[in-house]
Image: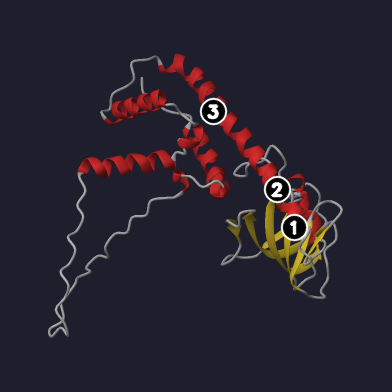
Amino acid sequence: MKFISKLTAGFVSMGLFVAAFAENTPAPASKPVKFELPAVGSTTTAPATPAAPAAPAAPAVKFTQAQLMEVYGFMLALQMHLPELEFTAADTDSIAKGIKMAIAQENPPYDAQALSPQLQEFIGQRQQALLVKIRNANAAEGTAFFAKLKENKAVQILPSGLGIEVLKAANGQTAKLGQLVKFHYSLSALNGRVMESSAGHEPLEALVQEGSMIPGMVEGLQKIPVGAKYKLYIPTQLAYGDKGAQGMPPAASLIFEVEVLEVKDAPKEAAPAATK
């Protein structure tokens, strides 16, 4: 019986938001290894009449295949975000044993159907523990961030907790509930990492209506005149809350830069558009 893992999607989705929000807690795993390959057809030609004798070239560093494979395994573990699941040394040895079996195209000597539920439960517990850590870290980060933001005189904190900063002023029309807004945006985490952006793409058009987007955007879009560009500081209670969402970690606060291009009435048959 082939051992086909159903856990890959879970690892990937966990990895997406771990990578997006992990920059505030530097660790060896947060420093990706960079490899630069030589350009195809690149050559080095010595000048015909050098002004001075060229210094002897440093000998190229050669690595053993064992060293290359060690780094390859290191990169695979980081891509799968295994360090965040806090496996023990014994767990790591067992994982390595499983990898060896897979490369040798051998099946584990266990009943896959009988083992799968327990494996799902085990990994699920590790992922849940990681979610709790991320939630607590994001909540603490958000509390500290918005406390500091109140000292910024350029930012207006509304009663809801939404922060607004004018980057480019304008006197155009502002949207009302039920209207369509066309806008460019970029979405960042509190650490400044840009997660999404409409730059280089068509602007987004969205219906300003409760339930069509997160509450912070519903409120914020009603404050931005056509032609203006604002920065919206959205606390977690106005974003995705303690549970988070697909691709969005729990208790995350967000920063949007929004430039409103157009406001118009929505067709009567328009349904709420699900956007951020």
Percent position of residue 243, x then y: 69, 37
Circles 2, 3 touching at the beta carbon (< 8 Å): no
Residue shown at 73%/59% (left/top)? 232
On screen, residue 180 versus residue 21, left or right, reads right
On screen, residue 245 versus residue 20, left or right, reads right
Which residue is at the front of the view, 209 or 153? 153
Which residue is at the front of the view, 51 or 49? 51
Residue denoted by label 2? 142
Residue denoted by label 3? 126
Secondary structure beneath dot 1 equals: helix
| Amino acid at pointer 2 | Gly
Cα–Cα gap, marks 2 and 3? 24 Å
Residue denoted by label 1? 149
User: How dense is the environment of label 3, judged by Cα within 10 Å: few (below 14), some, or many (20 and up)?
Assistant: some
**Can see residue 24?**
yes
Percent position of residue 59, x then y: 17, 60
From the viewer's perspective, is the residue at label 1 or at label 3 nearer?
1
Rendering quarter of residue 92 = top left
**Can see residue 276?**
no
The quarter in which the N terminus is drawn is top left
Percent position of residue 247, x then y: 59, 44
Secondary structure beneath dot 3 equals: helix
Rendering quarter of residue 157 = bottom right
| Amino acid at pointer 3 | Arg
Vertical position of residue 111 compared to residue 183: above or below: above
**Mark found first going from the N terminus, 2 or 3:** 3
Rendering quarter of residue 97 = top left
Residue shown at 75%/71% (left/top)? 228
